Image (cartoon, helix red, strand yellow):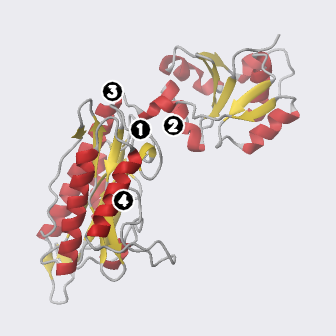
Amino acid sequence: MKKSTVLRILMATGLEENDVRYATGLVATDPFCLFLEGARLHLLVSALEAARARKTCPAARLHTPAQLFADAAPRRRTLNDQILALARQLKFRTVQVGPHFPVGVVRALERGGVEVRLAATPAFPRRARKSPREIACIAKSQRAAVAAVRAAIRCIHDAQITSSGLLKHHGKPLTSESLKDLIEATLLRHGCSAEGTIVAAGPQGARPHDVGSGPLRAGAPIVIDVFPRDKATGYWGDLTRTVVRGRASAAVRRLHRDVLAAQKLALSMVRPGVESRAVQRAVEEFFRAAGHETRLSPPGRECGFIHSVGHGVGLDIHESPGLRNEPGRLCAGNVLTVEPGLYYPGVGGVRIEDTVVVTRTGHKVLATFPKKLEI
């Protein structure tokens, strides 16, 4: 009999891991699989994970290797064997997978006589619209980011300036690395982990994803970008401030003034029904009118406003929706960053970022922190 329901398979690893976590709440050390049969969930897990899976996701039907191969001679079965066996047990000769599904598993299914088709849509597009619980989880991570940025800026403020312009704290050179250690320790106290924290000073800050290294100096812009992930829930936060210890140059003060104004403009547009690309284009036009040249090449010499205004935040640090040049309208429940920036080799970079939730009438900043340049 022909199946009227599509069977979609997701692997709890790589770029599909958080889709599976979203649907089931389950996280495990080893890869496991989620089968979506319409509204029904099937979880394929090892015997070691079965009890926890049953408790975490009671709505799912559990499958283990021992059940799948109960009548077969005992031997080790690979995950590919298990996935093929479950597809056959569910009587599906055609399945769907997403663009990030492992190609090795696809080949194993095809060798077993199962046709594999590429799904045209995300498994859970509703992830873009956060529930009140999810918003609370992200807000908690955002408050941790605020605490960490506050600790970092306080340390920079308290540092002594040597005759050569270097910063010292408690008699030791203040470096990007030591400041990131402080940030990580602060995040751990708030139940979060730190991954890829940016403390990029001077010319390093002209490269938006340069994590920064080496001694910090007075008078140079320091980009501090903290994006913690809550260790219990898996939800991220994201916050950036740019500061200067002492007096900033006129060029850096101008960059900071205009980035702050661009963020204010973008925030004023964030509300239900607004097109993502309208916000991006408004900020691009603002910077052009203010006289800030943007070049996207050659590699390593890009300058100006060279990235999108913002990105979605949730179980992934970058997810839908974004504030960029693509179609799509914001809706209540979207959580995203608003983070314009300007970058010029030889001068440095300035970025200001907050994470907001779109409300029914506008937006709400999930955790506030001052945006002062000189400290």
Q: CA distance from mark 4 to mark 2?
A: 21 Å
Q: Quadrant of the C terminus?
A: bottom left
Query: Toward which corner of the image does residue 361 lie, by quadrant?
Result: top left
Residue 198 location (% of width, % of height) = 35, 63
Q: Quadrant of the N terminus?
A: top right
Q: Nearer the viewer, residue 128 or 184?
A: 128
| Mark with earlier residue (2, 3) | 2
In this view, the mark in front (3 or 1): 3
Label 1 crowd (10 A; few <14 / some 14-19 / many >=20): many
Q: CA distance from mark 2 to mark 1?
A: 9 Å
Q: CA distance from mark 4 to mark 1?
A: 17 Å
Confirm or deny contact between disc 2 and disc 1 (CB under 8 A): yes
Residue, disc 4: 197
Residue, disc 3: 133
Q: Nearer the viewer, residue 130 or 199?
A: 130
Q: Please, what is the three-letter code of the amino acid marked with disc 3?
A: Arg
Label 4: which secondary element: loop
